[in-house]
Amino acid sequence: MEYRGPAIVCSNRNHAETAVVTRLLTADHGLLGAYVAGGRGRQLRPVLLPGNFVEAEVRSRVESQLPFARLELRESRGPWLAEPLPAAGIAWVTALTAVALPERQAFPALFSALSALLTAICVAPSARGWVIPLLSYEVLLLRELGYGVTVKRPEEGDWTGIFAAFDRIGRELERYPLAERHVGVMATRAILRDRWARIAGA
């Protein structure tokens, strides 16, 4: 395969001494797993932060081979990863995307929605500005995978309704796309819920 274009870094796994196997969400090819030589080095480590927007060149000689990737940073989420709430939001939505989606199946609507959600997380003055978009992204992901979920859209600032919707969607995620592999990923979601609860009670 051969791809060159924009991508969102969703997850990384260390490989050998210095390399990384990364998972990138693209508009045209969906989720791509790729080998990044030197990915754990000082130069590339900041490029591979989950949530980063990159220009990716992904190539493999044969279909069964893990592609090699070269990445160039376009937009970093690094400054927001030091803030507890944005960091939890970014960690959850990228982990969910990396685990739930099948590889090499295009989901252009999810690519656009995730791009917009990550931007909202980083530019909104508070978490209240991206709570509803995050719930909408989860619902869209379920629907794109063929799992319809009926959940009432809460009003902005209605934390009782927000948590009810969040918990309802979470049960559907555990039951369907995250079945048998949800424990670690849902722990990330639990951290996000706990941090939301702190501002809801403030």
Image (cartoon, rainbow, N blue to C red):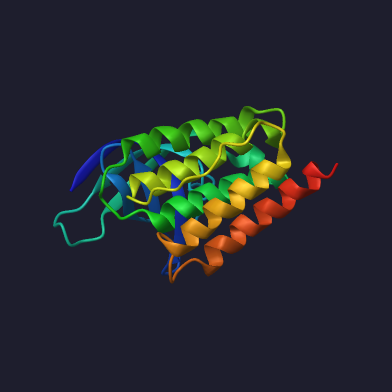
Q: Is residue 118 left or right of residue 70?
A: right
Looking at the image, which residue is at 42% across and 37% down?
54
Decide if residue 170 is on the left or right side of residue 87.
left
Residue 99, percent from left and from top: 42, 58
Q: Percent from the top left, x then y, of residue 144?
A: 34, 44
Residue 111 x, y percent position in the rendering: 38, 37
Residue 42 appears in the rendering: no
Q: In the rendered image, which quarter contains the C terminus?
A: top right
Residue 58 at what x, y percent from top left? 27, 46
Viewer can see residue 181: yes
Q: Is residue 192 above or below residue 107?
A: below
Query: Which of the pair 30/6 is nearer the observer?
Result: 30
Q: Nearer the viewer, residue 134 or 4?
A: 134
Please name whichever residue, 20 or 198, is drawn nearer the observer in this view of the structure.
Answer: 198
Q: Is residue 75 left or right of residue 35?
A: right
Left or right position of 122 against 44: right
Name above or below for residue 34 compared with residue 126: below
The residue drawn where x is 39% and y is 48% is: 148
* View extreme (right): residue: 202
* Residue drawn where x is 69% and y is 36% of the image: 127
How many numbered callouts? 0
